[in-house]
Amino acid sequence: MRAGSGTDCLRRTGRQYGYFDYPMPVRSDTRAIHSCLADNGDMSRITELVINGLSHQVHASPERSLLSVLRDDLDLTGAKYGCGEGQCGACTVLLNGEAVRSCMTPVSQAAGKPVTTVEGLERDGQLHPLQAAFLETGAMQCGYCTPGMIMSGLSLLGRKANPSDAEIVHGMQGNICRCGTYPRIVAAVRMAALHAKAARRTS
Ligand code: FES
């Protein structure tokens, strides 16, 4: 085994867990592993990320997923890991204003571009109107899909200010709620659109 390789770093920084007697990383170990890899030259690039308006420099190999960097390096855990294959939408964030599956987005693709996560939506302690609408309509049960739903809803409202229910359903395709709160999710997006329309009238 090459000293400083990924496996070596796993062995040196991981912990023994479960039945398999193999050092499996847990979340708190991830930073140590990345730092070990960086020390040994395995992390080939420092990537500049602009997350929620703040600039971050991260040691990351270009092919690591944006989701992994957000959650494990930057402690932005709003975006969730669901399927890891681009099929569930739990990891959705905005990249350049467009909804992307961060589990399938290499971090190099996000370099220098604005990334918005659910943590970046509130302003001065006030929830974003779409977040408020999700709460008002009770559009969640377990809540695991909610950040991804909100980011996809935001992207949809950015493209279409006043979508019909059918357009909301179509626009949110690919975001899965295992609790089945879809009717309330549609109601939340509709409510946010109506609030935004009313706000535009009065401004
Ligand atoms: Fe990214 Fe499911 S975790 S789409």
Image (cartoon, helix red, strand yellow):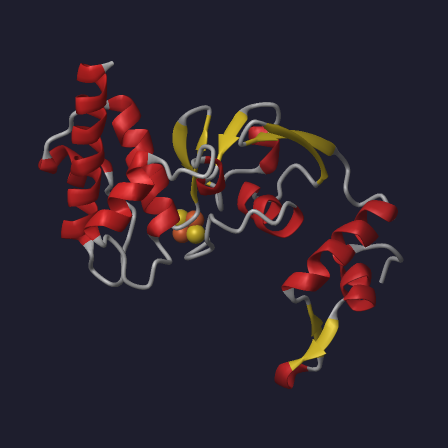
Picture quadrant where residue 187 is located: top left
Residue drawn 32% across the image and 45% down it = 149
Q: Residue 141, percent across and down?
A: 27, 62
Q: Which residue is nearer to you in this view: 124 or 152?
A: 124
Horizontally, residue 123 falls left or right of residue 67, namely left
Could you tell me if residue 142 is visible in this image? yes
User: In this image, 33 relative to 162: left or right?
Assistant: right
In this rendering, does residue 89 appear at all?
no
Is 151 above or below relative to 9? Answer: above
Q: In the rendered view of the protein, which quadrant contains the C terminus?
A: top left
Instruction: Identify the residue shown where x is 75% and y is 51%.
Output: 34
The quadrant where residue 62 appears? top right
Left or right: where does residue 173 sit relative to residue 167?
A: right
Q: Nearer the viewer, residue 200 or 174?
A: 200
* Above or below, comparing residue 30 to residue 135 in the picture: below
Q: Position of residue 15 (x, y in %)?
A: 74, 73
> Where does the image place residue 201, in percent across and percent down from the top left?
17, 16
* Residue at x-position 22% and y-position 54%: 138
Quadrant the N terminus occupies: bottom right
Q: Is residue 154 left or right of residue 62?
A: left
- Compared to residue 98, the image places residue 62 above or below, namely below
